[in-house]
């Protein structure tokens, strides 16, 4: 079976400087979750943004060959990626803060059954339907962000820092959603995160990044959780 | 922020290699080698040649030269604001109005001895700038544009009311005499204006080299960085706005001398936009660009008047069409030029020349390299 | 008393037009963060298209307004798409300044084609005035106000209930996110310019209708004169701008009656300066519209 997402030779630069991500390759199969682990500044966010071509700050540029569902996406911009079936869930500003929850969900689909499906994953969103998204809790905001991305029936979902600023219990809950979405929607998920423990629980594959390069990749069981923590991330277990 | 960010003139910030300061030849060579030096030299040569030509010409050429200088000073005022604080204001005509009316009012109370009107105009422009700039300068971007628009309407309306009440039909401006010399018309007036332009230019250039200019440069590069470094950004932007107002008021006073009277109707939004067009066409990042832009925009109508009818008859239009619609066509062309420059060529003529120079330099150096290579291959 | 009541009548009629003018600015500002001075050019083009349709095609004024609105909407969309789209997304401020130039181009074209003196409209609306509670209410005031309110209501409905309106809302809230979710910012911006063009044409037409002349200077000035109303409401508040227009027209009429006509401009713009100093986001706008 061929991969739902293939990226070859990704390179990201800011303001014409030295590349912050070099020679990045990945294949993500449909129905699986891959997590990029790494410290702050390892190049995780630049990698995800580079894939979709969303580099508005400091004149970022990216080069890569990206294939979504065996279709080569030539144009490196978020709109074209979204049309091709790849959606990035942003790290910050990931919801429409001044719009109510249901109101914004309805903007992105005219298909009522799809909306119902998404709300089945995240019943909490229906309960909070009349609340402005700016008032939501961090976890609810993540659910809304993923829910918004799901409405367009993407084939590939990129998720940037799902765990940012959340309590450990909530991180585990959201990570388990990634697993469920991969299995039930047949999504190929590529997430970048710093929460090593919860990520390893749901990931089929792991890449550890440092200094803009993948320094090791494989399945959590092959690599061994302790060794990932110890050797590659410098965390004492 | 393409138009108002750093538009390329960061060469001046390059650290000077102090170790070699003693060797003037080397400095000269470095100056010549520096990208942009050719453009600067070319623009100044153009301006000086034009200035000499206008001074030697007949009375009508003198008159065009006079307007070039007046608008040149006004453009310097606008450039100070755009180039230093990175802000765009629509109040240029308001400050020119202030200068012209100050001159007229002083004349009517008998305090017209030159250069009193100019100095008073500058002072009033400075004060109005300080008082009116604050609401628009607390935030970036559009807010100064809007508040300066408000200032324009307020100032012109006040001037109009004064004019209607005390001097219906316009304020008389006395002839320009200085120390008994008649500088009121022709070449004499032209030279007098030229001297004033030089003084204004020198003051602005001096300001730019002092700490004041440095603070303004910092703000233009990044307001946030400047604020972090302890600069009171709003206050310094306000100073820039006020200084720009003072200079533009001087231009307004001189404008009144050239025209011979002051009428509020002359100072409208179109004039403000024309001043901005001059700065943008020349290139917002340098004073020489502003002067060049002022000259181009001032001369262009005359140039069009002599070439357009012929041009139009070639494409089959009646040549009389331009004569009857001249002011409208010119206004439309200027607006179009402004639109194109702001959107697609934000560094103006100066920018075009710079990239031209870069291309020539690259050509020369690649030829030289190739020559070097060939020599190397033979040996 | 009757002076005051008459002033209220005039304020409502003028304020409704200001509101319509302002709504066009707000629609574009929300979608693209551009303050489009070209709106004044579109009002001018709209007013003269209206004039042409009435005098040359001899159509009724309602039909003339509709055709003019459609034509200017198309023109506005084309202008955005071909002139501004590429630059607008990355440099909203530069684009705002450039729109001043385009307004000048339209002004020049209109001046060449129609001259610079006001042209009298044929009598398309009855000059009868109704007397209501001691106040004279000219028929044109009723018609222009009703048209302005209908135009305003239609605009709000498009924004509120159509898919494209909802997408504009999303772009206004968080443009990068909307793009990630598959909304073409270029397309919604073009739609916003089309809508704003239509409101400008309607505003220019009813302004002419109400004054019985098509006045180039007055019409292109209308946009400038409406600025204080827009600042009062907040540049990004489509709904608030109607109220802003009504309040502002009331203030103008008050100044007119108490101090005289020549103080209207001064008072209006002093008020605008004060508002910019005290409350730059207006009374209905969102504060982050200030951070450009």
Image: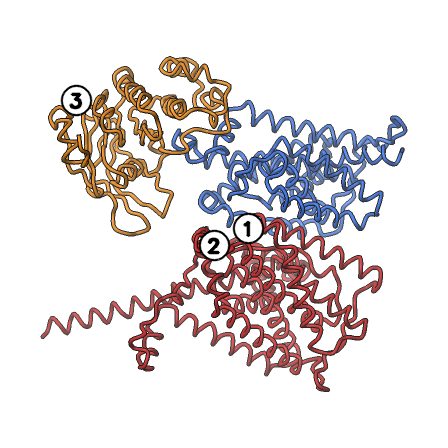
Front residue of B260/A192: it is A192
For the residues labelled 3 and 1, the Cα–Cα distance comes to 54 Å
**Image position, residue A229 (x, y; %):** 17, 31
Give the residue number, with chain letter if any, for mark 2. B3
Packing grade of label 1 (10 A; few <14, some 14-19, many >=20) is many
**Image position, residue B228 (x, y; %):** 44, 52
Q: Which chain is red?
A: B
Which colour scheme appears in the figure?
A: by chain
Mark drawn on residue A1: 3
Packing grade of label 3 (10 A; few <14, some 14-19, many >=20) is few
Whether the residues at callouts 2 and 1 have beta carbons within 8 Å, the answer is yes
For the residues labelled 2 and 3, the Cα–Cα distance comes to 51 Å
Mark drawn on residue C97: 1
In the rendered picture, chain A carries what hue? Answer: orange
Residue ranking furthest to the left = B379
Q: Quadrant of residue B313?
A: bottom right
Examine the rendered structure and indicate whether residue B156 appears above or below residue A232.
Answer: below
Q: Nearer the viewer, mark 2 or mark 3?
A: 2
Residue C72 visible in the shown view:
no
Residue ranking furthest to the bottom = B180
**Image position, residue A103 (x, y; %):** 49, 21
Q: In the rendered view, does C57 fall on the left or right side of A147?
A: right
The residue that appears at 71% across and 57% down in the rendered structure is B155
């Amino acid at each position: 079976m061929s991969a739902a997402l293939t990226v070859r030779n990704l390179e990201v630069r800011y303001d014409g400087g030295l590349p912050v991500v070099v020679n990045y390759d990945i294949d993500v199969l449909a129905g699986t979750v891959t997590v990029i682990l790494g410290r702050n500044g390892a190049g995780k966010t630049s990698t995800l943004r580079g894939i979709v071509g969303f580099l508005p700050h400091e004149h970022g540029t990216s080069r890569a060959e990206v294939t979504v569902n065996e279709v080569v996406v030539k144009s490196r911009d978020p709109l074209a990626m979204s049309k091709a079936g790849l959606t990035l869930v942003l790290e910050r500003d990931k919801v429409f803060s001044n719009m109510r929850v249901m109101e914004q969900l309805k903007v992105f689909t005219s298909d009522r059954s799809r909306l119902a499906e998404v709300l089945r994953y995240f019943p909490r969103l229906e309960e909070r339907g009349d609340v402005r998204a700016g008032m939501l809790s961090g976890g609810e905001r993540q659910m809304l962000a993923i829910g918004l991305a799901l409405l367009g029936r993407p084939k590939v979902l990129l998720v940037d820092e799902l765990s940012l600023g959340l309590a450990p219990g909530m991180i585990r809950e959201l990570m388990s959603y990634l697993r469920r979405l991969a299995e039930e929607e047949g999504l190929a998920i590529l997430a970048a995160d710093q929460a090593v423990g919860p990520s390893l629980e749901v990931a089929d594959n792991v890449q550890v990044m440092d200094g803009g390069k993948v320094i090791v990749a494989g399945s959590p069981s092959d690599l061994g959780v302790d060794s990932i923590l110890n050797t590659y991330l410098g965390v004492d277990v | 922020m393409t138009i108002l960010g750093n538009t390329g003139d960061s060469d001046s910030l390059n650290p000077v290699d102090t170790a070699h300061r003693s060797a003037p030849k080397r400095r000269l060579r470095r100056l010549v080698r520096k990208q942009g030096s050719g453009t600067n030299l070319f623009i100044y040569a153009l301006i000086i040649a034009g200035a000499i030509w206008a001074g030697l010409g007949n009375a009508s050429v003198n008159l065009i030269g006079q307007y070039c200088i007046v608008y040149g000073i006004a453009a310097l005022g606008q450039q100070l604001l755009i180039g230093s604080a990175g802000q765009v204001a629509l109040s240029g005509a308001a400050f020119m109005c202030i200068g012209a009316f100050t001159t007229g009012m002083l004349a009517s109370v008998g305090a017209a001895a030159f250069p009193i009107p100019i100095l008073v105009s500058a002072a009033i422009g400075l004060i109005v700038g300080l008082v009116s700039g604050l609401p628009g300068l607390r935030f970036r971007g559009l807010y100064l544009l809007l508040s300066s628009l408000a200032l324009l309407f307020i100032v012109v309306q006040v001037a109009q009311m004064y004019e209607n009440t005390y001097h219906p039909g316009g304020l008389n401006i006395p002839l320009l005499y200085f120390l008994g010399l008649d500088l009121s018309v022709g070449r004499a007036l032209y030279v007098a204006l030229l001297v004033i332009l030089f003084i204004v230019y020198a003051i602005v250039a001096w300001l730019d080299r002092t700490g004041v200019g440095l603070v303004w440069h910092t703000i233009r590069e990044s307001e946030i960085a400047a604020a972090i470094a302890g600069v009171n950004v709003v206050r310094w932007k306000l100073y820039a706005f006020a200084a720009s107002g003072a200079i533009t008021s001087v231009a307004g006073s001189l404008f009144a001398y050239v025209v011979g009277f002051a009428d509020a109707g002359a100072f409208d939004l179109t004039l403000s936009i024309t001043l901005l067009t001059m700065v943008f066409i020349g290139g917002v990042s340098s004073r020489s660009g502003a002067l060049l832009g002022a000259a181009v925009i001032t001369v262009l109508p005359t140039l069009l008047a002599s070439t357009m009818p012929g041009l139009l008859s070639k494409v089959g239009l009646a040549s009389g069409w331009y004569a009857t619609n001249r002011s409208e066509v010119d206004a439309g062309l200027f607006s179009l030029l402004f639109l194109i420059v702001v959107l697609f060529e934000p560094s103006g003529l100066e920018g075009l020349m710079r990239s031209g120079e870069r291309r020539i330099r690259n050509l020369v150096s690649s030829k030289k390299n190739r020559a070097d290579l060939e020599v190397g291959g033979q040996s | 008393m009757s002076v005051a009541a008459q002033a209220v009548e005039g304020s409502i009629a003028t304020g409704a037009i200001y509101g319509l003018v302002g709504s066009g600015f707000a629609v574009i500002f929300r979608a693209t963060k551009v303050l489009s001075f070209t709106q004044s050019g579109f009002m001018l083009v709209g007013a003269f298209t209206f004039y042409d349709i009435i005098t040359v095609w001899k159509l009724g004024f309602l039909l003339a307004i509709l055709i003019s609105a459609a034509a200017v909407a198309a023109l506005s969309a084309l202008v955005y798409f071909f002139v501004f789209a590429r630059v607008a997304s990355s440099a909203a401020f530069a684009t705002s300044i450039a729109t001043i130039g385009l307004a000048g181009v339209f002004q020049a074209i209109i001046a060449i084609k129609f001259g610079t003196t006001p042209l009298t409209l044929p009598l398309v609306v009855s000059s009868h005035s109704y007397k209501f509670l001691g106040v004279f209410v000219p028929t044109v005031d009723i018609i222009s106000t009703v048209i302005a309110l209908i135009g305003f209501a239609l605009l709000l409905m498009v924004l509120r209930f159509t898919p494209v309106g909802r997408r504009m809302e999303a772009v206004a809230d968080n443009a990068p996110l909307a793009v990630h979710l598959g909304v073409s910012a270029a397309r919604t911006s073009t739609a916003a310019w089309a809508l704003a063009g239509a409101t400008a044409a309607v505003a220019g037409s009813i302004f002419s209708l109400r004054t019985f002349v098509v006045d180039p200077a007055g019409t292109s000035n209308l946009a400038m004169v409406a600025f204080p109303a827009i600042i009062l409401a907040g540049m990004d508040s489509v709904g608030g701008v109607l109220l802003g227009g009504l309040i502002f027209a009331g203030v103008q009429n008050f100044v007119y009656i108490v101090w005289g006509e020549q103080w209207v401009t001064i008072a209006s713009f002093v008020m605008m300066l004060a508002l910019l100093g005290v409350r730059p986001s207006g009374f209905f706008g969102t504060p982050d519209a200030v951070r450009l």
